[in-house]
Amino acid sequence: VEGWRLANYGAAGAMFSTADDLQRWDAALLGHRVLGPAATRTMFSVVEGTGFVNLGSFAYRPQGFGEPAPEFIDREGAIGAYQMEKVLVPEKGYSVIVLSNSAQADIFAPFQGKGMMLDLRAALGRYW
């Protein structure tokens, strides 16, 4: 058994949540109940010279779906066997959240053209 303490991860992941709570947080962000519209745009804007990094997550448009994809605001994380992938889609007004308790789940890295989020995007097609 791996010897680690969740408290050692601090703000990098020492939190507990549910998909429902994360969805409520995302809805509050997208509805400007956490930050105003200008601050939200700043938070989601790519930091110049970083490629696709913004303040705390990644911003990009996934490729390969035959039409201009909406912008994804992507945040992912893992500690031990627990993984989380969360994509906000501000242009559409929603988010998609995947939680896993398996270190082998391939849910990460849609910005690299792989992972469960792109599989969901492909399956949902025009609804995404």
Image: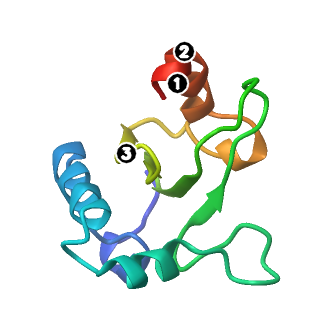
x, y percent for residue 40? 40, 76
Q: Which mark is residue 10?
A: none
The answer to whether residue 89 is above or below residue 119 is below
Q: Which mark is residue 95?
A: 3
x, y percent for residue 118? 62, 31
65 and 96: which is toward the camera? 65
Q: Which amino acid, by three-letter code, is at mark 3?
A: Ser
> How many callouts does the rendering have?
3
**Which residue position holds label 1?**
120
State how far apart marks 3 and 1 are (Cα): 12 Å
Give me the residue at 55% from left, 68% from top.
57
x, y percent for residue 127? 45, 22
**Which residue position holds label 2?**
123
- The quadrant holding residue 115 is top right
In the rendered structure, which disc, 2 or 3, sits on the residue that comes first in sequence?
3
Give me the residue at 34% from left, 44% from top.
94
Give me the residue at 78% from left, 78% from top.
50
Q: Which amino acid, by three-letter code, is at mark 2?
A: Ala
- Seen in the image, is 93 located left or right of residue 22? right
Residue 106 in sight in this render: no
